[in-house]
Image (cartoon, helix red, strand yellow):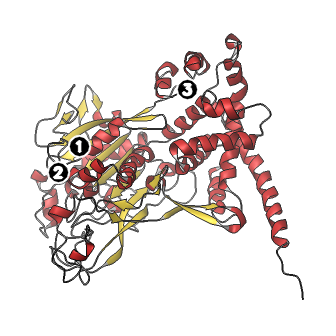
Amino acid sequence: MLAPAEFLKDITIHPEFQTRIIDWLKPWRLKTYVDILIVVDSEISTSPTNNFGIASVIELLRSSQVGCMKFRVDIALRSNEMFSVDASPTPTQPKYRGFRFNSASAGADVIDKYEQIWCFGFKPSNSGSPDDGQIDAVGALPATNAELNKLDQWMKDKKGGLFGTGDHHFLGASMCRKIPRLGTMRRWTNADGVPPIGGLNRIDTLRPPPPVANFQAGGPSSLDNGPHQGDLTVQPIRWVAWKSVYSAFGLRKKRPHPVLCHPTLGPIDVMPDHAHEGLCVPSPNLAANKKFKAELEYPNATDGGPKPEPEIIAFGSNLGSDDWNFAKGPQPARNNNPMIAVYDGHRAGVGRVATDSTWHHWMDVNINAIRAADNDNWKKISRYFLNLAVWLNPPGFSTKCLYLSVVASHFQTVGFQEFHPKATTLELGRALREHLVVRYGPCWVTERIWELAFELKQIPTRNLLDFSKRFENASVSSEVFEEMVLGQMVEATMKSAEALKGEQVRAVRALAEPEKLFAKPFAAAMSAFTKEADRQMKLENDVVRHFKPVRQ
């Protein structure tokens, strides 16, 4: 954990007040960086000199910041080498070689140093064999029970977040197919019905570049993986509504899952295309045991509420050979290919999990041209990678960025212009919300507020779940709820913030730890929102009554 002098370096505030705030936040301890371990089989490169790899994604993570949060990435190579640690690897080299999930260094388990683990598996092979027995062959380095037990414990103890993916057929199955939740959220084996590399059942998502007519049935050209998976033409994806947000007079706006929200461009609705992708699983067996021990794969909620379940947040589609020419032969058109799945295990006492139908949405060979173009498609696709890095965090990480954003806002433009003693709670919250939405987008704000609601535990979890569910259909604005919460948080810090801006700096007492400081303001916001919601509904009903037709 970092002291204020360190974590304030990542926040832009008026320089006159930078040093004053350090003592104000003296009790606070925050971690504003996330440690991610990226695990690859030896076939997947982490160097930009080989485009069959993920070097661009690693560079993006290391160079990006979302809110107060930065990302530190280490690379682990699963190989037949003896386990070793490179204390000072180059940016593209593995820190760990011969890595296993239960590897230890200096007397400590390696994975305990990380908040997230991302797995990009290739083994057993690209053979296309129908024999699933190859997955557990010794040379394929399958994850052992000892490794899986260590991963399982890490997901419980640290609530660590895990992402993993492969490709068509059983690519990646040796590393990933038995990992808790990940192994059942995606198809990994022939027995699972994983799509093949060729034939009618492949998932070929290639889209025609201009001139499109050349690729239509009877045209002179065919969609081919070599030239077309790495061009500027992307595939559309269909996102699934995560939240339904009320607007005036019964109108509702839908939002995708936070993983698929861009701060300014709206829903992330594109991905790179490829000639043979995999598939996620829409409805895993929630009653099944783990593949390595007799224990529920999907644990029950620790708060007594409904069992958390995985969900598909995006579907892909593919064109059909009746209308288009494909180099790999015929395939039927499909519109509902499960592409991205997520599982929020925090309420069940375990970490979050996410998976993708293919690592070709991540590979340099697929994204480098789009990245170089730096167009809206790249902005959306790259934000998908960053959103996952935020969403997979253990509980508390992201809300700490909200706490810091509230405090910093007093010493930014919004605070100097809009925060004053005569402003109402709602006015203060509206000003701060608009400030945060411009910087991080509406989905970031909404998710942080709801995470705050569950973490502060001012309201029983069952009541919160019911409140959240009813919100989806209620004729009240969720934005007003967010403004109430943010307004109360501003008020809780305003008096001492104003003193810091003045001449009585020595008289300002340090703020309490954020969880203690903001607990009562959040409860007050819930109470105030209930009253405001009643007032709004009465007002709207009164207006609607005036639109009744006059009797003839």
Side (left or right) of 15 relative to 385: right
- Residue 43 in picture, x, y percent from top left: 14, 49
Residue 36 visible in this rendered orientation of the protein? yes
Q: Of 421 and 303, which appears nearest the observer? A: 421
Instruction: Give the mark nearest the N terminus, 1 or 3.
Output: 3
Gap in Å between the C-alphas at discs 1 and 2? 9 Å
Q: Nearer the viewer, residue 449 or 319?
A: 319
Count how many numbered circles sit on residues in the image. 3
The residue under label 1 is: 55
| Residue ID for mark 2 | 52
Q: Amino acid at mark 3?
A: Ile
Q: Position of residue 183 (x, y in %)?
A: 31, 58
The one of 76 and 72 positioned closer to us in this rendering: 72
User: Is 499 rendered above or below residue 353?
Assistant: above
- In the image, which disc is placed on residue 13? 3
**Secondary structure beneath label 2:** loop
Going 53% across and 51% down the picture, which residue do you hit? 443
